[in-house]
Image (cartoon, helix red, strand yellow):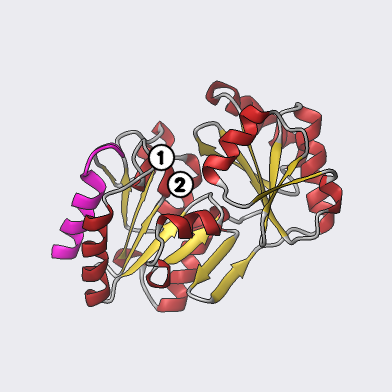
Amino acid sequence: MAIKLIAVDMDGTFLNSEKTYDRPRFEKLLDRMDEKGIRFVCASGNQLPKLQYYFKNLEDRITFVAENGAYVVHGDEVLLSAVMEEEMVQKGISALQSYSNVPFLLCGVRGSYLPKGADQKYADIFKEYYLNIEEVKDLHEIEDEILSFTTVFQVTEVPDVLEYLEEKIGGHLSVVGSGFGFVDILLPDINKGLGMKMLQEKWGITVDECAAFGDSPNDIEMLKQVTHSYAVGNAEPSVKAVATYEIGDNDSTSLLDTIEALLAE
């Protein structure tokens, strides 16, 4: 069955270790996808402006499943905006602050918010992934619609962080590891898989007509939502366990090679 939708995670999957990709080759593949009527979806834990930055001047040809599925955008149309109620925002703030003094971002529709005076080491890490970070005195007084929280720890500490947050707020919010030490908090049942399902239903595309690529636990629901699921070689074991295929790592040409092979079918 011909492929009609191809979705890729970004960090650790589509992007190499230098956070770049072979743009000329990708543009040629995107031209072929457009000719064949194949949808290209960028599905990431990153915020929309950062994802649009990676695909500057190509944004109108790509659908974005941003914020781990909390914000889905196609062209000028917002298909999903999973905004947290104020009570949930406060629960998230309280849980993160009670665990440690590690800074965290509140990610909204219009921007991302970091407490003033946050350790510069963390601020620099966040700036690698988020473009429009605003420092605020009080996280409780942000005038924006909040989609998610994100924070970062040593990779070895992430299981403990996830366990603590799950026990603290798991009945109210969803907690997920996004790779590279990042931990994200969203509304329950919000994930890349939900975004994928929404797009499949909107466009009348079956799971057999979809391919997806990922490397981290936040990609698992997306990979389960398609028949042709690919884990890159550097993917975590839990991701490889659910993927149908394993390809080369994100520093190889394997992902674009695989897309080219899918287009040739």
Q: Is residue 43 magenta?
A: no
Quick one: label 1, few (<14), some, or many (20+) residues within 10 Å? many
What kind of residue is marked 2?
Ile
Q: CA distance from mark 1 to mark 2?
A: 6 Å
Question: Looking at the magenta stretch, what is its main secondary structure?
Answer: helix
Q: Which residues are magenta?
A: 249-265
Q: Are marks 1 and 2 in contact (CB under 8 Å)?
A: yes
Indicate the position of residue 216 as horizontal and vertical percent values.
45, 40
- Residue in view at x 31 percent, y 48 percent: 21
Q: Is residue 208 above or below residue 163?
A: below
Indicate the position of residue 227 as horizontal and vertical percent values.
32, 58
Which mark is on residue 239?
1
Q: Is residue 260 magenta?
A: yes
Which mark is on residue 6?
none
Q: Quadrant of residue 261?
A: bottom left
- Residue in view at x 23 percent, y 57 percent: 24
- Residue in view at x 28 percent, y 54 percent: 23
Q: Is residue 15 above or below residue 118?
A: below
- Closest to the observer: 163 or 235? 235
Q: Which residue is mark 2?
A: 220
Q: Quadrant of the N terminus?
A: bottom left
Indicate the position of residue 161 as horizontal and vertical percent values.
66, 29
Indicate the position of residue 137 as horizontal and vertical percent values.
84, 43
* Left or right placement of residue 250 versus residue 66 in this view: left
* Left or right placement of residue 231 versus residue 166 in this view: left
Q: Is residue 165 above or below residue 200?
A: above
Task: Let me know if residue 51 appears in the view.
Answer: yes
Q: Compare marks 1 and 2 and give the one earlier in the sequence.
A: 2
What kind of residue is marked 1?
Val
